[in-house]
Image: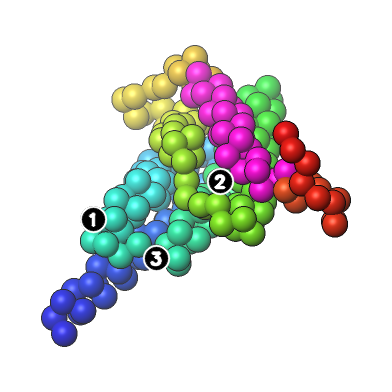
Amino acid sequence: MSIWFNQRRKFFFVQALTLGRVPLILLFLAVTIYFGIETPEPWFAVAFFAMILSAVTDMFDGYFARRFKVTSNLGSYADPLTDKIFYLTTFPTLVYLASCRDQHAHARSLIILAILFLLRDQWVSFLRSLGALHNLSAKANWSGKARTIISFPMICAIYYYLAAPGSWPIHLPPLLIHGFELAGMIINLISIFVYTAFYWPALRAELRVPGEKDTPP
């Protein structure tokens, strides 16, 4: 009974880490939309650290799930869902902030980056759906993990660059931000290619005309 109870607590702890990203990123959204680029220092700190916590929990929920041996189908589906909510919330907000600062070229590049992130996610979801019909694993591969490692610090850095009060001691150079954004675009393109290659057998099978027999390579 005690072992079962401990496992239950561990399971719900991991689920709380995963799903807890949603209220954190919505807190960031509410503060940023309400105050815009004139966010008071205390409220900027709240929004910024809510964003950081939301990103950090993504790094640890999978780790604790494996360590506690409480991996589940719920977690495997909830994790990419909360990632999408993170991207859907942060990218439009960053475009809005860049526009408020009259950084119109930067806003355009952020729109391209946002579209690339969201298209990649939808494409991978589509491939996983096809893969499930052919018993292919839906687990994230190295490119998905590399994308996560790059994207969360990138988004946090862009927000800090656009909205941090001038009195804060650290000022990020534009070159660093643009380098981050270029890296984000590249890793998304790599991830699209890697996932497409992995699920290509399922995609090729589904591209056959119904009733058509397999042809030898």
Q: Amino acid at mark 2?
A: Tyr
The percent coordinates of residue 119 (x first, y second) are 67, 41
> Mark 3 falls on what kind of element?
loop
Residue that carries the numbered disc 1 in the rendered image: 67
The one nearer the camera, 11 or 161, is 11
The percent coordinates of residue 176 (x first, y second) are 46, 18
The one nearer the camera, 177 or 142, is 142
Which label lies toward us, 1 or 2?
Answer: 1
User: Which residues, given as a range, are shown in magenta?
Assistant: 179-204
Above or below, comparing residue 9 to residue 184 in the picture:
below
Residue that carries the numbered disc 3 in the rendered image: 72
| Local crowd size for mark 1, using a 10 Å CA cut-off: few (<14), some (14–19), many (≥20) | few
Residue that carries the numbered disc 2 in the rendered image: 87
> Mark 2 falls on what kind of element?
helix
Q: Amino acid at mark 3?
A: Ser
Query: Is there any visible trace of residue 109 in the rendered image?
Result: yes
Q: Residue at x 18, y 74 (%)?
A: 6
Which secondary structure type mostly characterizes the magenta part of the structure? helix
| Local crowd size for mark 2, using a 10 Å CA cut-off: few (<14), some (14–19), many (≥20) | some
Q: CA distance from mark 1 to mark 3?
A: 13 Å
Give the left or right position of residue 89, taking residue 27 as reference. right
Q: Earlier in the sequence, mark 1 or mark 2?
A: 1
Q: Earlier in the sequence, mark 1 or mark 3?
A: 1
The percent coordinates of residue 113 (x first, y second) are 62, 32
Return the residue found at the far front: 216
Give the left or right position of residue 10, taking residue 16 as reference. left
